[in-house]
Amino acid sequence: MGKKFILLLIVLLLVMFPGILVGQASIKKVVLDERTIKDPLKSWSITFTEPVNKGTIKEQNFYIIDGNQKQLKTKLKLSADESKVTITPETSYKVGVQYYLYIKGNVKSGNNAFLNEHTVLPFKLASAENSKKVSNEQTKNDNRQDSTNTSKVDPKPSTTQKPDKKETHLMSTQALRHSHFVEITVKVSDQVTKVKAGSDEFEYKGNNEFVLYKPDQKKGEKLSIKGYSLTNKVLETKEIMIP
């Protein structure tokens, strides 16, 4: 079938790995979870595992539309090694408007191998008020945690007092296998502001949930997940098994 041609869509640290179909592009479509962004002129980078056919770097294959199917004016840029495409809007996104980033299956590698999926990423621009509210809440939660850690200790503790139960910060984890990648979702406490698995950082979805897309994860493989506070302190580590 030839060498695999895979794309890595990076949204903060979001990663997707569709497979390949040699000879023609498939119409199969993969729609990812919606993202909320803060930058009104956010660029999106799509990185492939090998150089891209320059003839397929065009607006018909990499584009952004709004909820009314109107295509935004964008600029496409190919990296020096020809393996990364960056799409940048020429005008600012609007608050409250639904947008969709499309990477079509018509994109080919230098060896003329097509992607076998159209990939769609829905996203919206957060209002300044909502962005500030989230930041303030995270700061307040972290300050409250630090205050708790430095509180005075009872000079005469009871000898029968039991140690405090360890607080849970990684409330729940879920790993869902797709055709070419594993989607890992973590629900966290208010004190957690960052989640990582090794060097891979999860993306914040909202409502105290983080998500990470991992390729090439074998069934039964164990993955260590860590939750961090605003001061980069590890609050909890949890191990999950890949389905």
Image (cartoon, rainbow, N blue to C red):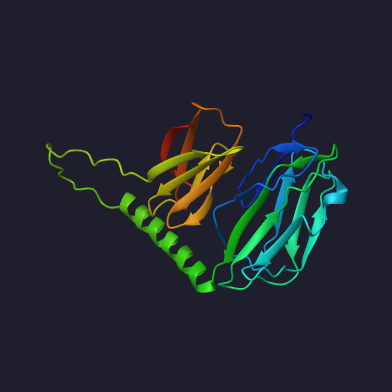
- Image coordinates of residue 156 in percent, x first then y, are 15, 44
Relative to residue 112, is residue 41 depicted above or below?
below
> Seen from this angle, which residue lies furthest right?
55
Q: Nearer the viewer, residue 165 or 86?
A: 86
Q: Tell me the quarter of the image containing the N terminus.
A: top right
Q: Is residue 113 above or below residue 220?
A: below
Residue positioned 79% across, 60% down in the render: 59
Instruction: Give left or right: position of 30 versus 155.
Output: right
Relative placement, left or right, of 109 versus 15 is: right
Q: Residue at x 44, y 41 (%)?
A: 174
Query: Which residue is drawn at the image coordinates 66% and 41% (left, top)?
Result: 18
For the view shown, which residue lies furthest in the top direction?
220
**Going 50% across and 55% down the picture, which residue do you hit?**
205
Image position, residue 6 (x, y; %): 72, 39
Vertical relation: 241 (above or below) 153: above
Image side of residue 177 versus residue 100, left or right: left
